[in-house]
């Protein structure tokens, strides 16, 4: 893609995200979401492969439907209350429609079907933007309206997301699809705590974004897209693959890595809110996703493939690891000891 065009699309993404995050009025928030959607479409379809065009079409249709629902819920609320302020969403029907719209934008179950397909049809860098930056504006809207949303509905969506995110990722061989189901599962953790402690949702989102960025950038460096390629990637960059192993285990939420921190705090908060059964259920369901993280981690560190693959052995590269990956990996793995400081900030 032309660098100037690329710059325009990235700038538009930043503009759309900034407008949505900083707006008080529903129409401005909707405008920001629309700018974001239109800016990411060329980035998804830039390879001109039929799969990429299909992914862009699916993404456009889903996001357009979700944006229409956001507009509809805000207009219904304005009709009944006379308020266009985002924080003044008080009408029950509007809250219900908005929850559905944001769930569709984020890819929460049962509106998740588009996300793995779109991620699979996109390049790794665009997949990274879709999994992290594109989720920030809808998460901000959820954060701002969290006091008015229906707790029962969000808890059901969250538990279903964690269950299906783990369950449907078990059988995948394409790494982008595995990361898509991992994202759905993490969104479930964010949704369940949103009503009780919205700041924990944001903390979970930030840490998830850091860990996912690390995984995507590492995969982009080693040019790995499926498990069979990952099996032979050890010889290419052993140190990078070791760090990928630790980041994947952190993403799974294993102590003493960074990913354990949000899960620990969420379980603690749910127990305080007399929701011990929900906390137990969501913890057990996250074992499903632990299985495919462990499978990815096993494939990452395997030095000699157990069976003859069709892929040639990779030559070791002497190219130095980028500073961004080094910093992100350190944060993804070693942030748990700093949790008291993080809790004082949150």
Image (cartoon, helix red, strand yellow):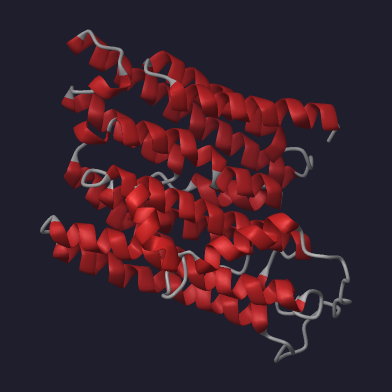
- Relative to 80, say whether 252 is above or below: below
Q: How many marks?
A: 0
Point out the image quarter for the N terminus. top right
- Relative to 64, say whether 142 is above or below: below
- The residue depicted at 40 percent of the width and 34 percent of the height is 140
Q: Residue 329, how many percent across, how many down?
A: 61, 64
Q: Residue 44, how many percent across, how many down?
A: 68, 39
Q: Residue 98, how many percent across, how many down?
A: 31, 30
- The residue depicted at 25 percent of the width and 63 percent of the height is 267
Whether residue 243 is visible, yes or no, is: yes
122 to the left or right of 31: right
- The residue depicted at 53 percent of the width and 29 percent of the height is 17
- Relative to 23, say whether 182 is above or below: below
Which residue is most to the left?
Answer: 274
340 to the left or right of 243: left
Whether residue 178 is visible, yes or no, is: no
- The residue depicted at 52 percent of the width and 51 percent of the height is 209
Q: Residue 301, how many percent across, how many down?
A: 66, 82
Q: Nearer the viewer, residue 129 or 321?
A: 321
- Relative to 303, say whether 6 is above or below: above
Q: Nearer the viewer, residue 234 or 250?
A: 250
């Amino acid at each position: 893609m032309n660098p100037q065009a690329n710059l325009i699309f990235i700038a538009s993404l930043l503009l759309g995200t900034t407008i949505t995050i900083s707006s008080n009025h529903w129409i401005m928030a909707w405008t920001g979401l629309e700018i974001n959607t239109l800016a990411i479409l060329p980035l998804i379809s830039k390879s001109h492969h039929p799969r990429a065009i299909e992914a862009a079409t699916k993404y456009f249709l889903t996001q357009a439907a979700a944006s229409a629902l956001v507009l509809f819920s805000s207009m219904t609320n304005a009709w009944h209350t006379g308020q266009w302020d985002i924080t003044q969403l008080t009408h029950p029907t509007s809250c219900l429609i908005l929850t559905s719209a944001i769930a569709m934008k984020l890819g929460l179950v049962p509106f998740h079907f588009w996300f793995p397909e779109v991620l699979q049809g996109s390049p790794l860098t665009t997949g990274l933007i879709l999994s992290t930056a594109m989720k920030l504006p809808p998460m901000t809207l959820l954060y701002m309206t969290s006091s008015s949303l229906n707790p029962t509905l969000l808890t059901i969506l969250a538990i279903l997301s964690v269950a299906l995110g783990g369950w449907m990722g078990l059988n995948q061989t394409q790494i982008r699809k595995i990361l898509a189901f991992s994202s759905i599962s993490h969104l479930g953790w964010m949704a369940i705590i949103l009503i009780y402690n919205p700041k924990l949702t944001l903390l979970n989102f930030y840490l998830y974004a850091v860990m996912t960025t690390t995984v995507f950038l590492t995969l982009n460096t080693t040019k790995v897209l499926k498990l069979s390629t990952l099996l032979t990637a050890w010889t290419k960059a052993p140190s990078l693959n070791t760090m990928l192993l630790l980041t994947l285990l952190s993403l799974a939420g294993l102590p003493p890595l960074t990913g354990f921190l949000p899960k620990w705090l969420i379980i603690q908060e749910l127990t305080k809110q007399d929701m011990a059964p929900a906390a137990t259920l969501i913890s057990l369901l996250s074992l499903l996703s632990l299985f495919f993280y462990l499978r990815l981690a096993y494939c990452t560190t395997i030095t000699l493939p157990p069976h003859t693959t069709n892929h040639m052995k990779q030559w070791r590269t002497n190219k130095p690891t980028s500073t961004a990956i080094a910093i992100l990996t350190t944060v993804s793995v070693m942030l748990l000891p700093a949790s008291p400081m993080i809790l004082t900030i949150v």
